[in-house]
Image (cartoon, rainbow, N blue to C red):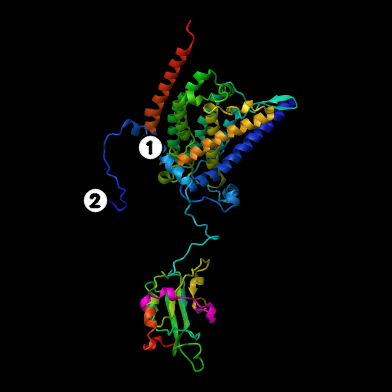
């Protein structure tokens, strides 16, 4: 029991630190990618290749003036960013980061908690995530912030439906809600994306909307809403909002890799004859590479596409993605039915 | 009519086809464009390490020229101040005393000569107005500063050094016509 608790504590801290570090450096990579796509270099003054830039940004945010509008609801104003950050860190709990590792003859799982309703857990947590934005936007007592918050909530509702419907097709195929089962069924190159390309597309588009990334960044929307829900935020409270966006990006990349790209599986690495721990490490690297790939796609899209108009966003969500997702569920059901052995 | 770039396209309100409606081909096309820019040569010049080349006739900080014997050419006629559209130039004239012939070329000289660099627009009209070829714009930059009064440049900042090797070369700023004219020693102006 003792070792179990210690191991889980260590694993939790490692995962937390990893997601924070990745989020930190995503900000740098984002700016680098933006720069390179616009024929410039991006930040390269703080340290070699700008490697100290995230640190400098963090220090800057910490030392900026704490500002709070005097008509703001104090408690909710503080709750907003804390909630967003907290929720962003929670999702990583059910993601299987790799195969089991062996320490002193005992096997340990690289997953924080193998909940048998892992997918439901993720969706529940992600839905709570919008509360942080809504509470923050409402508590600021600012029209722009309120508009941003309203947009965020309606956007979340519209896209979560299509997202869950896309996942239902996966669940029907797998027959399980546990993330671990879903991954273990995608051995080698047997990835879900080959069977469910439409579900993958729908999920990808919805993931952009869920993480408030461009072209669905209407809650922030610098050009029309100043800063949207975080207009009235400054200092590290603003930092938390911006930071949680990158954590969300990382986690949603992990979720997509797990659900569609076979998680930590890659053809032939289980036949290399490595020891269990080396195999686990290599598998983790594979998963990390897939997440990085998704992170790059997030940035790539952001610097390619302009923002949707609000009615376009709603039309895409309700009139295109949702019917498509339902259609996908139907087709999946029919195919499963046809493949069943006849009595 | 052809546009300036020759790349303009005629816009129409025709119904979009299915492929255009699902946007994905257009999105992929856009993503291909951004991806290709990821690898192209960057146009950035990394400033402090690498400086951009200036034109030979760049209009930067002014210089007050001396003649070949090291005497100030400026005679404080005030034509530059009159010509200046930004009213950046002020000067006080003084009379040359006996024994100062090695300092000033004419009997009258500028005891103070100031250009307010915050007003100056570096148009070069002072240079054009000067009958004595005493003021020229150079490739040197006026650097940023923290105090406004540091931007009022006096003779200390503007006058070129006495040392003949450290003189500012302004021949590039003179038009071929001027250079040709300067060879004509019949003109009293051109006799040093």
The front one of B56 and A212 is B56
Highlighted magenta segment, given as a residue range: B159-177
Q: Which residue is mark 2?
A: B1
Marker disc for residue A193: none
> Badge 1 sits on which subunit?
B
Marker disc for residue B26: 1
Which quadrant of the figure has residue A209? top left
Estimate the spatial distance between the alpha carbons at disc 2 and disc 1, rounded to whole Å. 28 Å
Residue A10 place in picture, x, y as percent: 69, 33
For disc 2, the neighbor class at 10 Å (few under 14, some 14 to 19, many from 20) is few
Q: Circle 2 sits in a helix, a strand or a loop, which is it? A: loop
Residue visible at 48% across and 84% down in the picture? B68
Can the viewer see residue B82? Answer: no
Give the quadrant of the C terminus of chain B.
bottom left
Which quadrant of the figure has residue A4? top right
Which quadrant of the figure has residue A258? top right
Residue B73 place in picture, x, y as percent: 45, 84
For disc 1, the neighbor class at 10 Å (few under 14, some 14 to 19, many from 20) is few
Q: Relative to A74, does residue A100 appear above or below in the rendering?
A: above
Magenta stretch encompasses residue A40 = no
The front one of A276 and A306 is A276
Q: Relative to A142, does residue A206 appear above or below in the rendering?
A: above
Q: Relative to B190, does residue A122 appear above or below in the rendering?
A: above
Residue visible at 45% across and 46% down in the picture? B37
Extreme-top residue of the structure: A343
Find out whether the residues at labels 2 and 1 contact each other: C-beta distance under 8 Å.
no
Q: Are marks 2 and 1 on the same chain?
A: yes
Can the viewer see residue B166? Answer: yes
> Badge 2 sits on which subunit?
B
């Amino acid at each position: 029991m003792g070792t179990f608790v210690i191991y889980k504590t260590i694993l939790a801290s490692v995962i937390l630190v990893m997601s924070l570090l990745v989020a930190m450096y995503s900000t740098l990579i984002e700016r680098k990618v933006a720069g390179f796509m616009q024929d410039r270099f991006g930040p390269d003054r703080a340290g070699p290749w700008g490697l100290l830039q995230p640190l400098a940004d963090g220090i800057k945010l910490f030392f900026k003036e704490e500002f709070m509008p005097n008509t703001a609801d104090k408690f909710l104003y503080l709750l907003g960013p804390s909630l967003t950050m907290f929720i962003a860190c929670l999702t990583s709990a059910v993601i299987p980061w790799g195969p089991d590792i062996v320490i002193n003859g005992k096997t340990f799982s690289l997953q924080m908690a193998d909940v048998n309703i892992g997918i439901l857990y993720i969706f529940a947590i992600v839905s709570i995530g919008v509360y942080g934005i809504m509470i923050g936007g409402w508590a600021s007592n600012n029209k722009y912030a309120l508009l941003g918050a309203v947009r965020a909530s309606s956007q979340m509702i519209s896209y979560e439906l299509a997202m869950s419907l896309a996942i239902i097709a996966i669940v029907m195929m797998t027959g399980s809600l546990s993330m671990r089962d879903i991954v273990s069924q995608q051995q080698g190159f047997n990835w879900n994306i080959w069977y469910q390309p439409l579900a993958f597309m729908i999920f990808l588009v919805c993931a952009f909307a869920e993480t408030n990334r461009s072209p669905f960044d209407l809650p922030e929307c610098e050009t029309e809403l100043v800063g949207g829900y975080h207009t009235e935020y400054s200092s590290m409270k603003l930092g938390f909002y911006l930071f949680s966006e990158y954590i969300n990006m990382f986690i949603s990349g992990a979720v997509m890799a797990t659900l569609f790209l076979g998680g930590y599986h890659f053809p032939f690495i289980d036949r290399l004859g490595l020891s269990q721990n080396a195999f686990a490490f290599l598998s983790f690297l594979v998963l990390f590479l897939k997440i990085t790939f998704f992170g790059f796609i997030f940035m790539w899209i952001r610097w390619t596409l302009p923002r949707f108009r609000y009615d376009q966003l709603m039309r895409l969500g309700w009139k295109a993605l949702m019917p498509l997702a339902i259609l996908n569920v139907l087709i999946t059901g029919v195919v499963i039915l046809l493949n069943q052995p006849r009595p | 009519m052809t546009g300036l770039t020759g790349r303009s396209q005629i816009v129409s309100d025709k119904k979009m086809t299915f492929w255009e409606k699902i946007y994905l081909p257009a999105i992929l096309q856009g993503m291909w464009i951004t991806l290709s820019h990821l690898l192209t040569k960057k146009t950035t010049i990394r400033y402090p390490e690498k400086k951009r080349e200036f034109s030979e006739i760049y209009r930067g900080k002014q210089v007050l020229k001396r003649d070949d014997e090291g005497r100030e050419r400026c005679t404080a006629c005030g034509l530059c101040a009159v010509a200046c559209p930004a009213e950046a130039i002020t000067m006080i004239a003084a009379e040359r005393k006996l024994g100062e012939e090695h300092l000033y070329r004419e009997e009258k000289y500028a005891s103070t000569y100031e250009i307010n660099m915050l007003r100056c627009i570096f148009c070069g009209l002072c240079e054009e107005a000067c009958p004595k070829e005493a003021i020229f714009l150079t490739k040197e930059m006026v650097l940023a500063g923290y105090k406004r009064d540091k931007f009022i440049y006096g003779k200390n900042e503007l006058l070129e050094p006495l040392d003949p090797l450290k003189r500012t070369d302004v021949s590039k700023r003179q038009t071929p016509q001027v250079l040709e004219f300067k060879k004509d020693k019949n003109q009293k102006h051109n006799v040093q």
